[in-house]
Amino acid sequence: MRRPNLTLQNPILRRLLLVVGACLVALPAATPTLGAATAQDEMQIDDQPGYVPNEAEEHLEGPLERQVVFFRTNEPPGSIVVHTNERFLYLVMENNRAMRYGIGVGRDGFQWAGQHKISRKQEWPDWRPPAEMIERQPYLPRFMAGRPGNPMGARALYIGQTVYRIHGTNQPQTIGHAVSSGCFRLVNGDIIDLYERVPVGTRIVVKQAPSL
Amino acid sequence: MFRSKSADRMAAAAALFCALSLLAACAGGPDGPTPIVSAPASIGPDALVGRWGLAAYHRDSDRPRTEAEAKRQCNNPYNITRGPNGGLIMHLADVAEPQELVLKGGPGGANFLGLPGAAGAPEDREVFAVSEKSFSVKWVNPDNANRYGMMIYVRCA
């Protein structure tokens, strides 16, 4: 039996090596980006203090709409689980179910992972734009008392003693996206719903996508 | 020259339309009240020069805590300086580049702050309650006023 030619003189082998080489170069670009959102992934939108969205704008459809879903987890019912890369927040229920909410994730929301407790709740929270936003929009007030149209939205749930929080928004179009400001945002109807369901002391677990 | 009655009626209707259009133009537009020709303001620009903690509120009940919060914002103050033409270097609503604005007097002793020109122009803000320690403003443009509410400046140390 004739032995196969496994040297580079074999045209078939040469072509195969070329194809493999091309794939190795292209693969990193084709692999979905994992980990924290980059500036390129962020939705480029400034906060709009005072803007009050209408009912149609606040209506979410499809996967982002609040709904009960199948959800397996080791976290006990009543816990909150946030998957930042998926842009979903889950309120764990009995029998492998969860109430799932579509969220927008601000840069702060990508900064940490772990578990905490909801330390306090507030209706119509106040808004304090971050320093980098003031730098871009120097005409902004450094503090705005909470009310409809406030960028912090209708409710806020504060996480431990950290600066992180789950809050509403006056920009419903940011749900499902990474954005520059804030932490975890829900449309006002959803944050009000969540606010009513979770007491102070609720366990919250934040999960980031693994970074390679 | 012979003129028909219908031509006379058309001419009269056109004259009436022009008169009504002129009146409508004088009544003001969607951006707010008609600007009043500027008179000297009752406050001098030096009263507004300085470093200020800047905060905003919409409900009167929020004013006391907003004022306290404005003081806390002196770690990132809003600076008002004199301009080369005697005005004040400040920002218009939603405009990142500062411009030289002037104080203008309006009817009833009202004071407005904005670009040179008529007092109470849509891009102006009305200035209230000026003291050594603070002053407040409200935008003339209803959209700006609705979004930003009453803005209070508290002097920083």
Image (spheres, coloured by chain):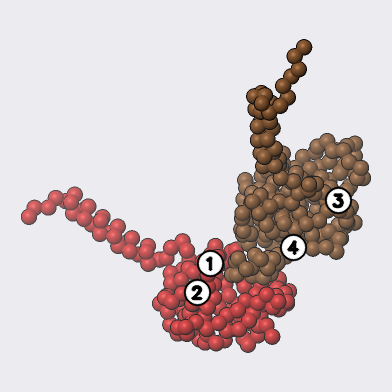
Chain colours: A brown, B red
Chain identifier of the residue bearing label 3 in the image: A
Which residue position is annotated with label 1? B95
- Tell me the element at label 4: loop
Looking at numbered disc 2 in the image, what kind of residue is underneath it?
A: Gln
Q: Are marks 3 and 4 on the same chain?
A: yes
Residue at 70 percent across and 37 percent down: it is A24
Residue at 67 percent across and 61 percent down: it is A150
Q: Looking at the rendered structure, which numbered label has been put on residue A125? A: 4
**Is the C-beta separation of discs 2 and 1 under 8 Å?**
yes
Q: Are marks 3 and 2 on the same chain?
A: no
Residue A119 sits above or below residue A72 on the image? below
- Tell me the element at label 3: strand
**Is the C-beta separation of discs 1 and 3 under 8 Å?**
no
**Circle 1 residues within 10 Å: few <14, some 14–19, many ≥20:** some
Q: Are marks 1 and 3 on the same chain?
A: no
Q: Please identify, in this view, whether the residue under mark 2 or under mark 4 is nearer the observer.
A: 2
Chain identifier of the residue bearing label 2 in the image: B
**Percent coordinates x, y for residue A53 in the rendering:** 62, 53
Work out how far the residue at label 1 is from the one at label 3, CA to CA, in angstroms: 40 Å
